[in-house]
Amino acid sequence: MERSDAGGTRASIADVARAAGVSTASVSRSLRGLGGVSEGTRARVVQAALDLGYAISPGASSLRSGRTRTIAVVTPFIDRWFFGRALGAFESVLQQADLHVLLHSLHGSPEARRRLFAERILHRRVDAVLIMCLKLEQHEIDALRALDVPVALLGSHAADFFSVAIDDFAAARTAVGHLTGLGHRRIGLIGGSPADPLRFTAPMERRAGYRDALKSAGIAGDRELEVDADYTIGGGERAMTRLLGLPRRPTAVFVESDEMAFGALRVLREAGVRAPDDLSIIGIDDHEMSQLIDLTTVGQPVAEQGAAAAHALLAALEDRSRAPSRVVHPTRLIIRGTTAAPRSGSAA
């Protein structure tokens, strides 16, 4: 908040106050654009500050306003495509507002999640919090409310918090509905485990959507066709290997993410199984690589969700009385070359 002139003297807020004939509180309010001062006073203060070469430092301004200009982000992973894309867009919006991100990655660990809330790590000074793709327990919701800062959820929903997401249940129904519409009746699933103690939201909703779509098509569910993976290429490879080893393999597979679908397609290629001639595959995401390998998928606007969460928190910081909003982004079926009607006898 000070500067040195040619003689080495540093101008202080008191110097500006004397030059403008106002109190130091009026100087602070005037230079930070706050109310409570007249336009004439503000003009005198600004001119005095310019004459003295005085400027408010971001750190000092934060101390006076009680703001840290830091947003905490809690994410189950940072090395997965979805989280990287969403976080990049989220941080880009904050950077334009001169705000910073304090990242808490759980690295897929339930214990890290427990410590985050039990040890009150989030009580370190932050202006707002973003929680990514976690289905919150009641004690976690209570802990977040106790922070008394704006909270946004990306990929889930809870009362009193801002929420940005897609409808994962509906996206899965769209994917499986595409396969049943082509005539497939034996449809496998590659997805995250709904029993995962981390309670990552997408696997639970997408598996439920898969089962509901089968039921709507009059197809009896077969748990043998549901194979757990871990939302990685390697997980997709292992899961597809299991499905190909079944006595009656599926004619189509719904994969809960494009990354897992990439691994599944690699296994098919190595096994000499052609997609879609021998087996159809559909994913979710519309990953940048999906178009290159001609993967049919259900696209979701990942970067847009991250940006929307950032804008929601910025608006809440500007107006703390703003009521929490819930934004559901649309998804769309993108038909490419990995799905087709089943061939007669292809499930043998």
Image (cartoon, rainbow, N blue to C red):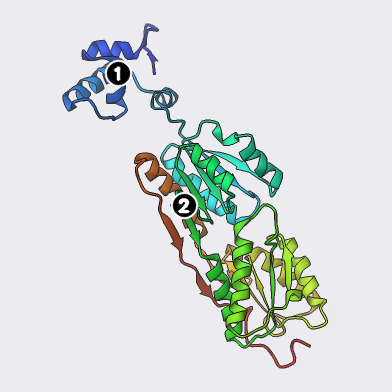
Measure the alpha-carbon separation of dots 1 and 2.
39 Å
Residue count near mark 2 (Cα–Cα under 10 Å), binned few <14, some 14–19, many ≥20: few
To which quarter of the image does residue 277 belong? bottom right
Neighbor class of circle 1 (other Cα within 10 Å; few <14, some 14-19, many 20+) is few
Looking at numbered disc 1 in the image, what kind of residue is underneath it?
Ala
- Mark on residue 191? none
Q: Residue 326 location, x and y as percent?
A: 43, 56
Q: Nearer the viewer, residue 261 or 250?
A: 250
* Quadrant in the rendering for residue 259: bottom right
**Camera sees residue 295:** no
Task: Give me the residue at 52% from left, 45% from top.
Answer: 130
Q: With respect to residue 43, does 253 lie above or below?
A: below
Secondary structure at numbered mark 2: loop
Query: Pointer 1: what residue?
Result: 25
> Which one is in front, 9 or 156?
156
User: Which residue does the image show at 64% across and 34% down from the upper left?
Assistant: 119
The residue singled out by tag 2 in the image is 159
Among numbered discs 1 and 2, the one appearing first in the sequence: 1
**Do callouts 1 and 2 mark residues in contact (Cβ within 8 Å)?**
no
| Quadrant in which residue 185 is drawn | bottom right
Horizontally, residue 338 falls left or right of residue 3, namely right
Examine the rendering and report whether any part of residue 273 can be seen: yes
In the rendered view, would you say 260 is above or below 42?
A: below
Decide if residue 9 is on the left or right side of residue 171.
left
